[in-house]
Image: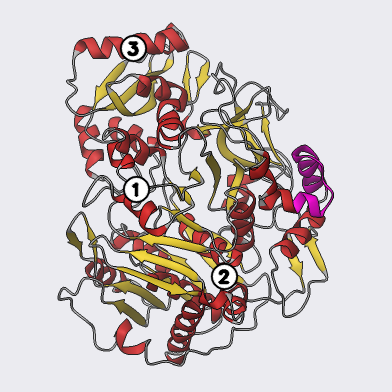
Amino acid sequence: MQSTFDFGGDIVWRPTQDEIERSNLHAFMREHEIASYDELMRRSTADVAWFTDAVLRFLDIRFTAPYTRVLDTGEGVAFPRWCVDGRMNIVRNCTDKWAEDAVHRERPAVTWEGEEGVQRTLSYGALAAEVNRCANALRQQGFGKGDAIGLYMPMTPEIVIALLAIAKIGGVILPLFSGYGEQAVASRLKDADAVALFTADGFYRRGQVVDLKRVADAAANNVPTLRRVFVLRRTGHDIPMRQERDLWWHDIIPAQSETAEAEDTAAEDLLMIIYTSGTTGRPKGAVHTHCGFPVKAAQDMAFGTDVHAGDCIYWMTDMGWMMGPWLVFGATLLGAHFFISDGAPDYPGVNRLWQQVEDHGINVLGISPTLVRALMKHGLDPVRAHDIASLRAFASTSEPWNPDPWMWLFRDVGESRRPIINYSGGTEISGGIVMGNPVLPLKPASFSAACPGIAADVYDEEGRPLRNAVGELVITAPWIGMTRGFWRDRDRYLQTYWSRWDDVWVHGDFAAIDEDGLWYILGRSDDTIKVAGKRIGPAELESILVEHPAVNEAAAIAVPHEVKGNAVVCFCVLNPDVEATDELVAALRAAIVRDMGKPLAPRSILFVSDIPKTRNGKIMRRIVRSAFLGQDPGDTSSLVNPGAVAEIQALA
C-alpha cells in the first residue's frame, strides 16, 4: 500500500542534554561505547544475541543456573529458544531480590486507589510477603508447576499479588479482562484447561457495583477442569459461595506463612498465556515464558519511558490487557513504584486523573488517545486545579493518534516540555516494535524509532523497504519478547505472522517512516480502505474528521460499491451541544475531499453516540463494519460499550 500522508510536520520536542544524560538509554549506550542511536540500532539488530545478553545484565536479571547460549534458532526464526539451559523464576527478580535488600525493601512497590477513595500502598518487603502467602495458599490447595490459573479481578493490590504468586509456584498466568462476559471467560479458561480462578465479589464503576462473581460462576460452571475459585471481598455485597469450590481470599491467604521458595523453573518455562481478540473462532492464546515477556517489558519501560528505581509509573489498563502484566513485570524488575486504580478515570469528578497525579507523585502517565479526546471536552480547568509537577512524561498505546488531541496533551497539558512516548507493538511482542524515547526528538503523533533490538521495517507489496509512504510493518529478526506461538495452534501462529514473506514477521499494521527517520502507525492493515484502486488507512480519514471542532471521535470503514469496489462510510461522535446537521455533513465531506481527493469522498457520514471500542481505547473497525453491513460481528466480548453495536446496526 502507498498513499499520501502528512507525516506530522515539524519537530515539536527535543530532549535537553540533562534529560539525555540521566536516561537509562544513555547509560546503556555509554556502558557499551555506543555513540549514537543509529549505531545502537545497527548493533542490536545485527547481533541480537549480544544485545539480549547486554540487556539481561543491564536489568540485573539473576539466574539460579546460567544460560549456555543466549539464542538458538535451530528450529527457525519463528521458534527461537532463549537463555538456553538457564534456570530462573522471574519472581525472584521481581520481588525477592528487592525484599532481601535492607534499603529497597522499605520503598513503595505498588499503590492502589479505589473509585470510592480508599488507598493502600505495599512496600517491596510487604509485596514479597503477600506474594509468598498467596503462593503458599495455592500450594496448600494442591496447585503447582504447569497449572493454569485465571485472573478475573478488578485492579486492586490482590490481582498483583495473585499474578506474581502464580508465577512463583511455576504456574501459568491467565489474565482475563474484568469486563468480559461469561462466554469469553469460560472459553479462555477451557482453552487453557484452567484449574483455578481468582475473582472478586465485584467492583465499582461510576458508583455502581459490577457483580463480577455472578459472571465468574456462570463461566466456571462450564469449565470442567476448574477446582477452586478464590474470591476477594471488594464491595461487600451478598454473593453465593459454592462450599466445595469457593474460598474467600481473606480466610485462606492471610493465614499463610510469609516465606516461600520460588519454584525451580527453566528460563523458557511457560509463564503466561494472554488471549488476544480474534474475528472468529477460538481465542488466540499468546504463549510467554519467564525470560521473555517480563524482560521485554522491563527493557521498554527502562529505555522508552525512562523509568528508574523509585520512579512512579501509572498506565491506565486492565490486567486482562497486556499492559497490565507489562506494568507489573516492568516496574518490579526495575525496582520502581507503580500505581493502579479501579473505576472510571473521570468519576466521581472529571479531575480524578489529575488528582491522582498530584496525590501520588506520578512521574510517567500512560493514557489512551480515546481518553484524551474525552478529557479535552472539559478544557484545562480540571488539569490546572492540580499540581502535576511530578509528571515528566506521558505515554500512549492501543490506537493511532489524531494530531489535535496529541497537541492538546503535549502543548496545553504538558506545557510543550513533557514528551508523549508513543508505544506500539502488541501482546505477541511483549511490548513495543516502535516507541518514543528520551534521547530522540518527536513530531506530533510520531514514534522516535524502532525499539532497540527490534529489526523493524516498512515493506511495500513486493516486500521491498519503503520510505515516505505507507506500507506493512515487519520485523526481520527474532527478539526475546516474541511469543513462543499460539497455545495449541502452531499452524495459526505461522499463518498469522510468518506466511507472507520467508523469515519475516508481518505484524498486520500499516506504518510509515518519514525523511527524518520518525515512525507512524496508521492502524490495522486488515482495516484497509480501497476505493477504485486507491488504498488508504482509516486513521488518515479519521484524523481529518476529528480536526473539525464539532467532532470528538471518528471511525472510517469500507463498504461494497458496485462500480468502485468499495466506498467510504464514516461514523462520527460529536462534541457536547453540537447539532447533527446536513451542513455539518457537507463540511466534513468537503474537508476529506480537500485533503484526500474527490475519489475518497465518503458515501455517507453518520452520527452516533459512541463507537465500539475496547476498554483500553482501541476502536474495533471490523465490528463497526460488520454491524453496519448486517453481518455477524464475531467476538464482541472485549468491548467496553456493546450498546454501540446495536446503534450502528440500526443505521444500516
What residue would you read off at disc 3?
Answer: 589
Q: Alpha-carbon neighbours of circle 1 within 10 Å: few (<14), some, or many (≥20)?
A: some
Quadrant in which residue 641 is drawn? top left
The verdict on residue 596 being magenta is no
Q: Alpha-carbon neighbours of circle 2 within 10 Å: few (<14), some, or many (≥20)?
A: many
What residue would you read off at disc 2?
Answer: 271
Residue 442 placed where, x, y %?
Answer: 59, 32
Q: Secondary structure at mark 2?
A: strand
What is the C-alpha distance between the residues marked 1 and 2? 35 Å
Specify start and end residues of the magenta stretch as a single range: 28-46
| Res. 354 mark | 1
Label 3–label 2 contact, CB within 8 A: no
Quadrant in which residue 246 is drawn? bottom left
Label 3 is placed on what type of residue?
Arg
Q: Secondary structure at mark 1?
A: helix
The chief SS type of the magenta part is helix
Label 1 is placed on what type of residue?
Trp
Mark 1 or 2: the one toward you: 1
Label 1–label 2 contact, CB within 8 A: no
Taking the spot 54% from the left edge, 41% from the top edge, the residue there is 421
The answer to whether residue 636 of the structure is visible from this angle is no
Taking the spot 54% from the left edge, 43% from the top edge, the residue there is 423
